[in-house]
């Protein structure tokens, strides 16, 4: 499988090259040249394969320069945690994607990317440095994914005072090959420093530099895996044979794009609902046919506060027109008040505590269920509610206990280097 730029101005490259360069030279995101169709044959199996084994079947066609056995070891090393599908109530199912080390779904893509990069590097005896600018969640998922991975150093640039204490503890206490850089500035400053570094000849010649943000195909492709596993479990574990509608709480639209690829590959999905907070760029596009990015608005579901979703370019390239996109995708947005109400309602009715992102997904499922009560819905549950104690307290007046892994991170010593936001300062630090 070759990868091309959404702008189609560059020659096609291998998965490996798309992985290590991140963005095509013409500035476009990489997309697969075609989507391989596998079909629903995997659903005929009556045995329950592990998540990693089902997932591997769907990832393998994109990565043709790694032997099957080696790819098997990569997915098993990356995904050491369960991804359970549970019945929330009636026809609403939740796919709990948050049992990885940082308790959010980004662990799934970040851990895969770390393992596969390390696999390629070990064959080339090459060392690289990965730079990431973060406003919180991405940094901790990447830090944990790459911690102790040989041949890779990770530099995480984050805005001083601009992330939650828990997020900061999760990415500054690992040490080893993970370097936390606290920038006196904003997230935009961090992003500027990363972009400038990637374009700086002196830094590039000192060490091979790349980035691990969510536009990288190394984080996108592995997300196809859990769509396959969820639909298989719905059929075999719950004996539901109607094609599910899948609800994706969305921000940068990476999760949704992986789902759309999964459906084209032959995984039985009726359609998708993109559920957003007040940052409703995609729902507006689906209504008006116009893509109008704008500055992001802060909400309770902050990992979805994206005003210019980068994966929109991939969706547009895939569908070609708003009409085609509408045949597969519906959209709906919810306010912070509606988010709190959904956390309350679900807790009252079922005892289950939703995090603010997953709550938006469940609210969307409830809305669309009214017109067809027999339709099964799978909602992607993207974070553990324990990461958002203030919102949960506001919604249901409950203090949820910290999971042991967070508790441990909170007690460890923060290790970070504090720098001003000037490029020269950062460059000197990196090169020393
Ligand atoms: C990143 C994130 C999302 C949004 O996913 P996208 O792929 O960016 O659309 C949703 N929920 C949580 C908890 C996240 O961390």
Image (tube, helix red, strand yellow):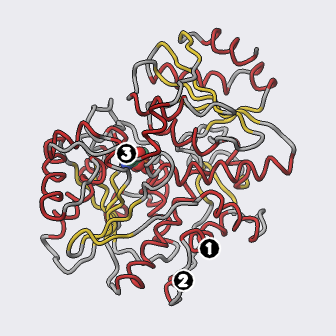
Q: Mark 1 = which residue? A: 57
Residue visible at 27% across and 45% down? 400
Quadrant of the image containing the C terminus: top right
Residue 333, position in %: x, y?
Answer: 22, 49
Determine the residue positioned at 21% across, 71% down.
Answer: 89
**Which residue carries the number 2 mark?**
42
Residue 135 pos. (x, y %): 44, 30
CA gap, disc 1 to disc 3? Answer: 27 Å
Disc 1: CA contacts within 10 A as few (<14), some (14-19) or many (>=20): some
- Whether residue 419 appears in this view of the structure is yes
Which residue lies under the disc numbered 3?
A: 251
Position of 12 with respect to 138 (left or right) is right
In the depicted structure, whether residue 301 falls above or below residue 11: above
Q: Residue at x 33, y 38 (%)?
A: 302
Queried on whether the Cβ of the residue with tag 2 lies below 8 angstroms from ligand 1, the answer reads no
* Res. 370 image quadrant: bottom left
| Left or right of 205 in this view: 358 | left
Label 3 C-beta lies within 8 Å of the nearest ligand 1 atom: yes
Q: Where is residue 230, by image quadrant?
A: bottom left
For mark 3, does the 10 Å Cα neighbourhood hold few (<14), some (14 to 19), or many (20 or more) residues?
Answer: many
Residue 229 at x, y percent in the picture: 48, 72
Does the residue at mark 1 contact the one at mark 2 (Cβ under 8 Å)?
yes
């Amino acid at each position: 499988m070759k990868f091309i730029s959404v702008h189609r101005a560059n020659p096609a490259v291998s998965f490996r090259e798309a992985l290590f360069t991140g963005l095509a030279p013409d500035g476009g995101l990489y997309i697969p040249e075609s989507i391989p169709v596998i079909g629903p044959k995997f659903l005929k199996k009556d045995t329950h394969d592990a998540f990693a084994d089902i997932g591997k079947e769907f990832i393998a066609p994109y990565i043709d320069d790694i032997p099957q056995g080696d790819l098997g070891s990569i997915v098993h090393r990356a995904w050491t945690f369960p991804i359970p599908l549970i019945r929330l109530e009636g026809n609403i199912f939740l796919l709990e994607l948050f049992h990885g080390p940082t308790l959010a779904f980004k662990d799934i893509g970040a851990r895969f990317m770390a393992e596969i990069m390390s696999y390629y590097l070990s064959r080339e005896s090459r060392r690289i440095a990965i730079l990431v600018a973060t406003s919180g969640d991405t940094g901790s998922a990447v830090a944990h994914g790459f911690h102790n991975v040989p041949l890779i150093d990770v530099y995480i640039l984050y805005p001083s005072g601009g992330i939650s204490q828990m997020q900061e503890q999760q990415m500054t206490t690992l040490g080893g090959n993970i370097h936390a850089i606290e920038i006196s500035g904003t997230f935009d400053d961090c992003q500027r420093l990363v972009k400038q570094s990637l374009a700086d000849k002196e830094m590039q010649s000192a060490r091979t530099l790349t980035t691990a943000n969510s536009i990288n195909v190394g984080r996108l492709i592995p997300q196809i895996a859990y769509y396959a596993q969820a639909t298989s479990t719905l059929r075999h574990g719950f004996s539901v044979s109607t094609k599910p509608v899948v609800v994706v709480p969305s921000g940068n639209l990476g999760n949704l794009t992986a789902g759309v690829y999964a459906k084209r590959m032959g995984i039985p999905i009726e359609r998708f609902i993109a559920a957003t907070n007040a940052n409703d760029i995609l729902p507006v596009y689906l209504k008006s046919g116009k893509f109008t990015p704008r500055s992001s608005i802060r909400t309770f579901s902050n990992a979805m506060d994206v005003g210019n979703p980068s994966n929109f370019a991939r969706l547009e390239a895939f569908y070609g027109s708003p009409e085609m996109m509408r045949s597969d995708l519906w959209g709906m947005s919810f306010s912070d008040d509606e988010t709190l109400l959904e956390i309350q309602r679900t807790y009252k009715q079922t005892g289950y505590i939703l995090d603010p992102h997953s709550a938006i997904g469940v609210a969307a499922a409830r809305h669309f269920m009214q017109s067809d009560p027999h339709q099964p819905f799978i909602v992607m549950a993207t974070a553990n509610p324990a990461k958002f104690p203030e919102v949960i307290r506001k919604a249901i007046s409950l203090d949820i206990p910290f999971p042991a892994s967070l508790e441990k991170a909170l007690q460890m010593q923060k290790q970070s280097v504090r720098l001003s936001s000037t490029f020269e300062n950062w460059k000197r630090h990196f090169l020393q």
